[in-house]
Image (tube, rainbow, N blue to C red):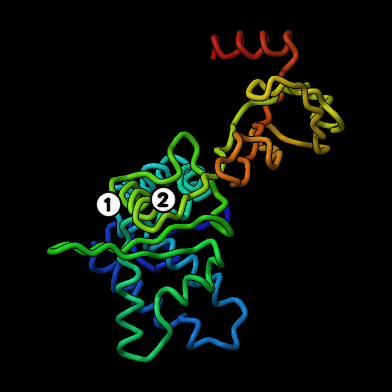
Amino acid sequence: MEDTDYYQVLGVDRDDDPKSIKDAYRKLAFEYHPDRNTENPNVLEKMKAINEAYAVLSDPAKRRRYDSIRQQYGSSAYSRFRQSYTEQDIFSGSDIFQVFEEMTRAFGFRGFDDIFKEFYGEGYRSFEFRRPGYYARGFVFTGGSAKRKPHGQPPINGPFGKMSKFLLEKISGITLPETGKDIHDTIRLSPGHAAEGGPYAYYHRKRDKKLIVNIPKGVQSGQRIRLSGLGETGKGGAVNGDLYLRVQIQQPILRSLKDGIGKLFR
């Protein structure tokens, strides 16, 4: 999934308008609907990718953010984008359920709720809010594949997402657990330690303690080491975030000085 491109998933171009994106999604949602592909074991993951791509590209703000990251980071845009958005964030305000309900009425397929529970397990829940002259429908993810956590953002953001959380907690009495945020830091290694690998002492400032990190042999600058569950503590019984250590290989002082002087005279 590291090189996923939302535009390629939907088969649309960067400049396509919202109508073209929705038309492409409708076509793919029908083609890969689980009720039409009961013998295909890969169809659920395919549909999840299609749903996610549409939810991002059909939302102007999320699309602008993704485009900005895509322009800057190219093929690694997906992983960087998902560091800031959970499934809850991505699907907040989406009209995906309308497309599924259209197919239910037209072809007798299972409804939106049944399909999304199959996609995301028991961590998925939906709700409706009705008042005279007003109707809203929302859905939340409280576990399962919604484990990807935001970095530097609340787990439910945007006006619709905040309203969804408020309504679900106040009206239905369901309290949403919040997965802990990931922590990102840098770990500085000597060339020898990076080449040989092995245990390395790292001071975890957030937890005020020293950790022994097992460095993979031959690790390169820019690669990340993930320490599961060592990010910020989850709330309400939710899982902790992860700790990501970005590798930086330190050059010997004399070599650094030589390289710096060389650049001055180029």
Give the amino acid type for the residue marked by disc 1 in the picture. Pro
Where is 153 relative to 258, above or below? below
Q: Residue 109 occupies which quadrant of the picture?
A: bottom left
* Residue 186, horizontal then vertical, whole percent: 64, 26
Which amino acid lies under the numbered mark 2 shown in the image of this protein? Asp
Label 2: element kind: helix
Q: Position of residue 122 (x, y in %)?
A: 55, 66
With respect to residue 169, does 104 lie above or below? Answer: below
Q: Which mark is residue 60?
A: 1
Q: Position of residue 192 (x, y in %)?
A: 84, 25
Q: Quadrant for the C terminus, please.
A: top right
Q: Disc 2 versus disc 1: distance between alpha carbons?
A: 14 Å
- Count every numbered label the image shows and give the total: 2
Q: Disc 1 on helix, strand or loop?
A: helix
In the image, what residue occupies the spot 50% across and 37% down?
151
Q: Nearer the viewer, residue 9 or 93?
A: 93
Screen quadrant of the N terminus? bottom right
Q: Which mark is residue 27?
A: none
Going 33% across and 79% down the picture, which residue do you hit?
101
Q: Is residue 204 left or right of residue 89?
A: right
Q: Position of residue 255 (x, y in %)?
A: 72, 13
Q: Which one is closest to the eye, mark 2 or mark 1?
A: 2
Observer-nearest residue: 242 or 159? 159
Identify the residue at horizontal 83%, vertical 31% (top origin): 195
Residue matched to label 2: 89
Q: Is residue 75 visible?
A: no
Q: Nearer the viewer, residue 54 or 146?
A: 146
Quarter-of-image position of residue 231 = top right
Q: From this viewpoint, which residue is outermost toward the bottom? A: 107
Is 194 above or below relative to 72?
above
Relative side of 1 to 52, left or right: right
Mark 2 or mark 1, earlier in chain: 1
